[in-house]
């Protein structure tokens, strides 16, 4: 399965331990504390967080990696809805693919106040999909949504890095030059 990750270093040449104290969220105590608890829950802290869709980060000098992840390297599947509420990304966080559906429903609902219709649809979605015990539902048995994230054991034993792109000024502006491959 092709997945992507955004790192401050090139995974092809990195040979150290992954340390939260030096990671992307080192300055965000809520997220790093939640990561520590998640790693305790899954029994592993040497993992690379991967997404199935496009990466959003465009910080110059960072690395976009495209990985062919092998199921034997996948330590956990993380439910993005649950994780984002644990990490307190926002009380109304809804994965993008579901939010698009809710916006479409609100727009085609036939009511005059589409904002109110959207808010009600979001409230109903969160009530139906957000568990009372977030930690009990943060990991899943398998991938069921495009927003699900994978924690892939590092160093990879069976997975392969397919492509690495260093974010430059050009690529940060949306141009796709300067790609390198393994």
Image (spheres, rainbow, N blue to C red):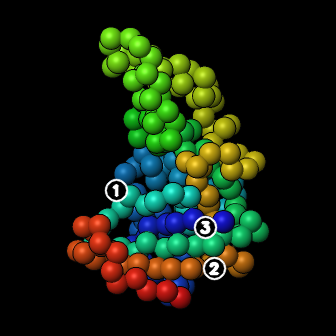
Residue at 53% in and 19% down: 124
| SS state under label 2 | strand
Residues at marks 1 and 3, CA–CA distance in whole angstroms: 29 Å
Task: Answer whether residue 115 is visible to the viewer in this image.
Answer: yes
Residue at 38% x, 58% y is 56
Residue at (43%, 22%) from the top-left corner? 108
Residue for point 43% across, 61% down: 55
Which is more toward the observer, 62 or 170?
170
Q: Residues within 10 Å of mark 2 (few under 14, many from 20)?
A: some
Q: Is residue 65 left or right of residue 174?
A: right
Mark identifier at residue 160: 2
Q: Secondary structure at mark 3?
A: strand
On the image, numbered disc 1 is attached to which residue? 27
Which residue ends up furthest to the top in the rendered image? 112
Q: Is residue 37 visible?
A: no
Identify the residue position indicated by label 3 in the image. 2
Q: Nearer the viewer, mark 1 or mark 3?
A: 3
Mark nearer the N terminus (2 vs 3): 3
Name the spot of residue 112 as percent of width and height, x first.
33, 11
Query: Based on the displayed image, in which of its 4 quarters is residue 68 positioned?
Result: bottom right
Name the mark nearer the viewer: 2 or 3.
3
Distance between mark 2 and mark 3 Cα atoms: 10 Å
Q: Earlier in the sequence, mark 1 or mark 3?
A: 3
């Amino acid at each position: 399965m092709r997945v992507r990750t955004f790192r401050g270093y090139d995974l092809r040449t990195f040979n150290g331990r992954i340390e939260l104290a030096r990671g992307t969220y080192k300055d965000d105590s809520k997220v790093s504390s939640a990561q520590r608890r998640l790693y305790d829950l899954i029994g592993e802290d040497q993992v690379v967080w991967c997404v199935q869709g496009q990466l959003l980060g465009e910080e110059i000098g960072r690395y976009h990696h495209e990985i062919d992840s092998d199921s034997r390297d996948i330590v956990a599947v993380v439910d993005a809805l649950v994780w984002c509420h644990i990490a307190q990304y926002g009380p109304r966080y809804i994965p993008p693919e579901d939010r698009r559906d809710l916006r479409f429903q609100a727009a085609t609902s036939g009511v005059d106040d589409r904002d109110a219709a959207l808010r009600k649809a979001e409230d109903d979605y969160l009530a139906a999909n957000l568990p009372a015990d977030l930690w009990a539902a943060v990991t899943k048995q398998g991938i069921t949504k495009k927003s699900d994230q994978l924690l892939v054991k590092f160093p990879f034993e069976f997975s392969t890095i397919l492509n690495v792109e260093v974010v430059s000024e050009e690529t940060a502006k949306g141009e796709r030059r300067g790609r390198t491959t393994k």
